[in-house]
Structures are given as C-alpha cells and as structure tokens.
Image (cartoon, coloured by chain):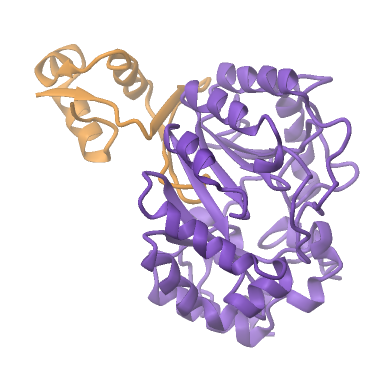
Chain colours: A orange, B purple
Amino acid sequence: MSLRKPRHVKYRREAEFGLVYDHENYGYEDATLASVDDVVVDVLERIEDEPVPREQLEREFSPATVEAMLQRGFLIDA
Amino acid sequence: MPEGPLSAPVTITWEVTLGCNLYCDHCLSGSGPGHQRPEELTTEEAREFIAELDEMNVFQVNIGGGEPFVRPDFLELLEELTDRDISTCVSTNGTQLDEATLDRIEAMDPLFLQVSMDGLRPENDAIRGEGVFDQVVDALERLEDRDVGTTVNTVVTRQNVYDLPEILALAEDHGAGLRLNRFRPSGRGEDSWDHFRLDQEGIEFLHEWLSEHPDVRTGDSFFYLNALGEVRNDTLKQCGAGSMTCLVDPVGDVYPCAFTQWDGLASGNVRDDGFRRAWENIASLRNRIDGHEGCPAVAMGSGDPNGEDPQLRVILSGE
C-alpha cells in the first residue's frame, strides 16, 4: 500500500512545532487545526510529490508514526 | 491549539470589493450598488497579495465582499488562488451564478461556495430585496448537479430564527449544508442591531434547536455554549481574530476580523506595507479586543456598558 496526503490536509512548520490543518468547509471554526511534532511535517514533506509505500515510510520514520498519522487522517491509501 | 503568534494566519477573510448588486439591511461591510471604492486593489496588486499569501503558506482564503462576483476580475483571482492550491470559500448572494460562471467555478479546486439565505421568502426578501429568495433557490437547484461543495449561510435574526427547521430542510433538499452566523453589530448592522438581534426567547430556541442538529455548522464563540450554558464546542471558545485569522478589506487594510473594521484597529495595508508586516503588527491589537466575554466584536459593537457580549450573558446568567 502506498500512502499520500489528502488534498484537504495542509501543513507548515512554525518555529517550535508543526501545524496541520484539515478543513472541510469554511474557516478555522469548521476545521481541525493540530499542533504537531516536527516529525509529522517531515513525513508530509516526504510524500508531498508522490505516494510512498507504507513499508518504506515506516522504515524511514517509524511504524507508530505512520499508524498515528493514518488514524488522524493525515495519510490515506493512495 | 497553538499559543503565541503564528508566522502566518491559518485562514484569512478577504473582502474583494464593497460593490454589490443588493443592499441588505444588515450588511456587515455596508456594501451596495456603486459602493466600490476607487482605491480597491487592482488586479495586479491582488495577484501580488495572493503570491504573498502563498509564500507565507496561508492555508485558506475565505472570500466575501460586497458581492465577489461583481468584481470583473474575480474569477481570474479565484483561479490564481486555487492554482496555488490555496483553499477557498466564496460567500455569495447567489444572484450572479450564471452557467458560464458555474462552469469555471466547477473546474477550480479546492473551492467551496456559501450562498446567503436569511430566512424563507418573506423574511429573506425583506432584508435582501424583492425576488432574491427565488433567485437563490434557482441557484441552489442549478448547483445540485455540480461538483461544488455548497452551504447555505444564514445570519440568524429574531425574524428568521423560528424558520431554521424549514431552511435546513430546503438546504438539504438541494444537497447543501447549513451554516449559521449570528447577526452582529457591524457595518449597517450597527444601525439595525436592535431590530434584528435575537431576544432571550430566540436565543434559547436557537441553542436548543442546535443541540438537536449537530450537523449544522456554526461560527463565532457565541455558539460554544448550549442553552444551558454548558460547553458545546470547545474549539469555538477561543476567538481567533488576530491570532489565527484576520480580515483584508478591499483596499488592502488588515483588521483582526470582519466584524472589527473600526478606526484604529487596522494593523497595516497589504499594498503599502505588505501582508507579512501587517500580520506581524496585528498581535499588538489583540489587547484592544481581548478581555471581552464571548465575541469581542459583539461586545464592542453593541456598546454594552459592561464591555461584554450581551447575548452570551443571556446564556450564562439567564438575564
């Protein structure tokens, strides 16, 4: 299985953390805004250009990180 | 939620023009026919602003006005945003959505539409103008078969609050969601505040009805409590004005939010200062709008003697 980022999930780095924005409709009131560890941004940057096999992502980061991001909806099956 | 200033807003609201083909009694920006300001951002200036938003990685731009679609270059600017993968949501009065416009909108992504409907026919047309309700329903019918995420947006007033069940049914019949905004005392709303604002009975009805309809979207910290004063949605408790979001008006002035466009509350101008600098300055305005219970804009605009959001006080104290 290869993983990619859903189109409606956006992210960026702040000085001391990362931000992940998962919007559905209008503004921040309707969206989920999560303050995340830098490693989450690392993963999202890794898959920015093309889907990456799950096993590869797990090797490069960790199975727990990949699983947590799948659970949060930050990663989906490509 | 993060604490401290962010490098960029999460979302912004951009009022692209004060021109509008309608003249609504409660318009938050005081827009209307011929109300375009001569110094509104040019197409080139607007493009430069969009490039700066992209560079700062602003996630979403919510577009309002005025009526955005009366601006001749609006579709061009919308394409500039979506081509850069900036999420957009356009608030429209629904009267300018001809088939050619819908064709172009449908090709853009990510894009959502919010179509205003402030009641059933009598209440809506009393506020927005004769015949507007039927035009909006027509637009909703034509949007049904389009791949465009659509929400009916209703400003809740004492005149329409009891029609919410029928408004929701109408929206759902057309495959649209419903989002409620509280009527707030800004723009022409300052003059019509006493006419449209909810009374205690209406507030209690609204919150009870909302508790039975969790899929109805809401904005503003007013909705973080239910009718019993219990926390309903904790994410709404924190006002994001000037910390997570801000407003850019048609001439490029930057304010904490759409409802705080008052003298002395602009932090800069995107044309003169650049948006980044205006955003960096906006944190200094937070202490001007903090300290109010509920929505700061309602607290300030209503002239409440205690500096509070008086409608939130109704919920908290029953007064």
Q: Residue furthest front?
A: B99
Q: Quadrant of the C terminus of chain B?
A: bottom right
- Left or right of residue B265: residue A24: left
Q: Residue at x 27, y 39 (%)?
A: A72
Q: Where residue B240 sits: x, y (%)?
A: 61, 45
Q: Nearer the viewer, residue B114 or B28?
A: B114
Q: Nearer the viewer, residue B267 or B37?
A: B37
Q: Residue at x 49, y 42 (%)?
A: B102
- Left or right of residue B123: residue B1: left
Q: Does B159 appear above or below B111? A: below
Q: Where residue B228 sits: x, y (%)?
A: 51, 80
Q: Does B277 appear above or below B131? A: above
- Dividing the picture into quadrants, the one containing residue B101 is top right
Q: Does B259 appear above or below B137? A: above
- Dividing the picture into quadrants, the one containing residue B5 is top right
- Left or right of residue A1: residue B109: right
Q: Where residue B281 sits: x, y (%)?
A: 77, 28
- Dividing the picture into quadrants, the one containing residue A60 is top left
Q: Is residue B133 visible?
A: yes
Q: Residue at x 36, y 60 (%)?
A: B175
Q: Where residue A34 sits: x, y (%)?
A: 41, 38
Q: Is residue A13 visible?
A: no
Q: Does B286 appear above or below B300? A: above
Q: Residue furthest bottom?
A: B201
Q: Nearer the viewer, residue B300 or B181?
A: B181
Q: Residue at x 80, y 21 (%)?
A: B271
